Image (tube, rainbow, N blue to C red):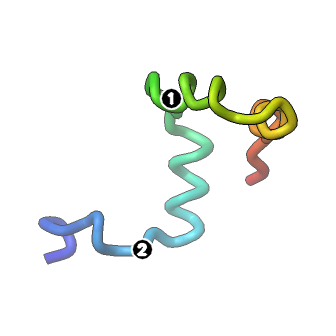
Amino acid sequence: MKTKFFEQYTLSDNEIRDILENGILVFDTNVLLNLYSYTKSTKEKVLKIKMSI
């Protein structure tokens, strides 16, 4: 069942770390366009976010 409904299972910390270290994050248009609707301070905070692993 885990292979058929993998989205229903929580990933372990090691699995998440592996995805973040070796995967490619792709932001779709909605993420980029949402920046226009944020306040200036929120936009600055979003753009300064750095992921820590």
Residue linked to disc 2: 10
Q: Nearer the viewer, residue 45 or 20?
A: 45
User: For residue 3, what is the image quadrant?
Assistant: bottom left
- Are circles 1 and 2 on residues that touch, CB within 8 Å? no
Seen in the picture, residue 22 relative to 27 is either above or below; the reply is: below
Q: Nearer the viewer, mark 1 or mark 2?
A: 1
> What number is the disc on residue 27?
1
Q: Where residue 52 sits: x, y (%)? A: 78, 50
Q: Residue at x 50, y 37 (%)?
A: 23
Q: Nearer the viewer, residue 25 or 38?
A: 38
Q: Nearer the viewer, residue 26 or 3?
A: 26
Q: Label 1: state its secondary structure.
A: loop
Q: Residue at x 45, y 22 (%)?
A: 29
Q: Residue at x 60, y 56 (%)?
A: 17
Q: CA distance from mark 1 to mark 2?
A: 22 Å
Q: Residues within 10 Å of mark 1 (few under 14, many from 20)?
A: few
Residue type at mark 2: give it: Thr
Q: Residue at x 57, y 31 (%)?
A: 34
Seen in the picture, residue 23 relative to 19 is either above or below; the reply is: above
Q: In the rendered view, does 20 fall on the left or right side of 44?
A: left
Q: Where residue 15 sits: x, y (%)? A: 50, 61
Seen in the picture, residue 18 relative to 38 is either above or below; the reply is: below
